[in-house]
Amino acid sequence: MKTVFLTGSTGFVGRAVVRSVLLSLQTDDRLYLLVKRPAAFEDARVEVVPGDLKDLEQVADIVRKADRIIHVAAEARLSGGHDYYGINLEPVRKLVEFAKEGNRLERFVFVSSIAAMDRSPSDRCKGPLTPASPCFPRTEYGRSKLLAEDAIVQSGLPYTIFRPAFVYGPGMRDDSHLRKFARYIRRGVPLHRLAFPGRISLIHVEDLAAAIVQCLDGASGRNRVYLAETESMPLGAALALVGESSLGRRSAQIPLPALKSFISRSHARLPVMVAGMFIDYFWMSDPAFDEILPNDYRKRTLQEAVGEITCDLL
């Protein structure tokens, strides 16, 4: 009997993970979902556990009995003024503590972020981030994620850590990267007409969820940190797809001035998203990540799935 404890099940990534986990479970397995508000699941294998990341003591016994933990929940908004350490770091320390007390955990899967890496001020962004790239998180969010990673790695528990690129798919937050761009475009801001050259890496939420499930059993992904991405393209190309899906027509793009050399030297003094529009700040590559998914698995592309981002725009 497999017992999985999952946080963040009602969020964008968490909902996809729940679907993938349930597909992998046997009849007598159990999936415990930590939720703030009561929720109903028809699947008999699911048990909803009312609770909060800031008060995990009330679910300590369940965590101690779990043989798999998938920690998705996080404070991911980058606008500032949020308790990043209280939400992104301290709960990880608590989960580690309870799991070690239970002494039965077979895998701690943690969804981190590309923000835990960022780029060093001396990095000219001429190549992709790789698992060997040093971490220089620029935000409190990124620093809290990196510290949470360290807490897991140093715990001695078996782990798999994912640092996703731009995650997209149905149910994205309105303030989340491509979804936010899509809203601006739908309102008449012609961002899709600008050929932003900065290369970004992307992954569909269902592909990330499938990779997470593959690392719950056996040796796959054990004690590894993965950069989770399935395709890369210039931001301008991504916005062209978003614009076509939002407006129903393909628009010619305007080439932008060659600012790459200047911005690559000064990106540390610019907002991350601004730098990423012109240089390959958000480009990552990890061939080992592709090896997690089964050989016959068909990864999604932005071109075929972009409608999931734009279908309900007003």
Image (spheres, rainbow, N blue to C red):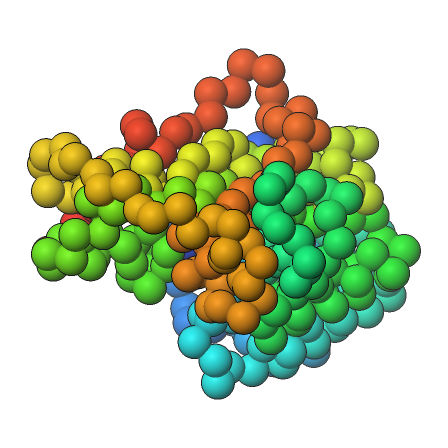
Query: Residue 304, percent across and down?
Result: 30, 28
Quarter residue 5 falls in: bottom right
| Residue farthest to the bottom, as pictured | 81
Residue ID at (81%, 69%): 97
Residue ID at (14%, 36%): 251
Judge from the rendering whether residue 235 lies leftward or rightward of residue 110; answer left or right.
left
Judge from the rendering whether residue 3 lies leftward or rightward of residue 152; answer left or right.
left
Residue ID at (20%, 57%): 183
Residue 199 position (above or below residue 66)? above
Query: Residue 34, percent across and down?
Result: 55, 64
- Of the pair 179 and 192, the residue shown nearer to us: 192
Residue ID at (49%, 68%): 270
Q: Quadrant of the N terminus?
A: top right
Q: Is residue 21 visible?
A: no
Query: Residue 271, percent across and down?
Result: 47, 68
Query: How many numbered discs?
Result: 0
Judge from the rendering whether residue 181 lies leftward or rightward of residue 50; answer left or right.
left
| Residue farthest to the top, as pictured | 296
Q: Is residue 254 visible?
A: yes
Query: Residue 292, percent across and down?
Result: 66, 29
- Of the pair 62 and 192, the residue shown nearer to us: 192
- Of the pair 118 and 23, the residue shown nearer to us: 118
Q: Quadrant of the C terminus?
A: bottom left
Residue 36 position (above or below residue 303)? below
